[in-house]
Amino acid sequence: MARISRAFPAVSAALLVGCLHVTTQSSPPPSGSANWHAVLPEGTARYQLAMGEVSSGAAPDRRVNPIYPPSLLSRCPPPVEVRAWLVVDASGKVADVRADDEASANADRRSYIDAVKVAARQWSFVPLKIDRWAADANGESHVVDSETRPFSLAYDFRFECHSGAAQVTTGDAPSASGHGSE
């Protein structure tokens, strides 16, 4: 019994030391994201519909958010906005993405523009459809012709970084009426 009582403190100490575990908390790796919203810049050209024409579609069907440029996260720069025009073909696929200031962009801004282009090229839209309606001899209206047309939309993409964590915000696009043409 004496032997057990003398060994107890030593064994207890060994067990406690074995239970000690120093946890080091590492900072989470920097991460980023972006947001966007549709805009209608002043002077945007629009399709002019004739009497009896009705437009539909031109609404986003699939959207992908840009990825915050990883090379810029460690610096966590102030928020950046990129205005881009998405040129959409008659089938609803994004055929081209054009940034307003792309030609004069420095290397950092070019990283944001590239992120917008990579994401926006993956977007798709419900095709812009123009139906022509007419009334027959009985006064009943029906579609006499239909076609899909290309169009373009402007979006502002906003990139934000807070303490090494980036955010790219997301918003809904406006309805299809009044969208600009290419």
Image (cartoon, rainbow, N blue to C red):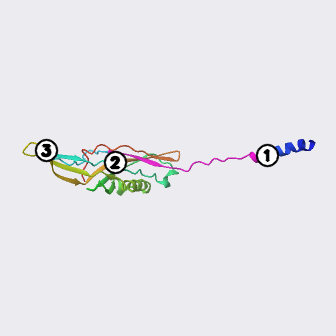
The residue tagged 1 is 15
Q: Nearer the viewer, mark 1 or mark 3?
A: 3
Residue 148 lies left or right of residue 156; in this view the side is: left
| In magenta segment, residue 27 | yes
Please tell me which of labels 2 and 1 falls first in the chain: 1
Taking the spot 31% from the left edge, 45% from the top edge, the residue there is: 39
Dot 1: element: helix
Residue type, numbered disc 2: Tyr
Dot 2: element: strand
Quarter of the image that includes the C terminus:
bottom left
Is residue 155 visible to us here?
yes
Q: Nearer the viewer, mark 2 or mark 1?
A: 1
Q: Nearer the viewer, mark 2 or mark 3?
A: 3
- For the residues labelled 2 and 3, the Cα–Cα distance comes to 37 Å
Instruction: Check if mark 2's residue and mark 3's residue have beta carbons within 8 Å.
Output: no
The residue tagged 3 is 141
Instruction: Check if mark 2's residue and mark 1's residue have beta carbons within 8 Å.
Output: no
Please tell me which of labels 1 and 3 falls first in the chain: 1
| In magenta segment, residue 144 | no
Q: Horizontal and vertical percent for residue 174?
A: 31, 43
Which of 99 and 120 lies nearest the eye of the viewer?
120
User: Dot 1, crowdedness within 10 Å: few (<14), some or many (≥20)?
Assistant: few
Which of 55 and 101 lies nearest the eye of the viewer?
55
Residue 108 lies left or right of residue 124; in this view the side is: right
The magenta stretch spans which residues?
Answer: 17-38
Residue type, numbered disc 3: Ser
Mark drawn on residue 155: 2
Please tell me which of labels 2 and 3 falls first in the chain: 3
Residue type, numbered disc 1: Leu
Q: Horizontal and vertical percent for residue 27?
A: 59, 48
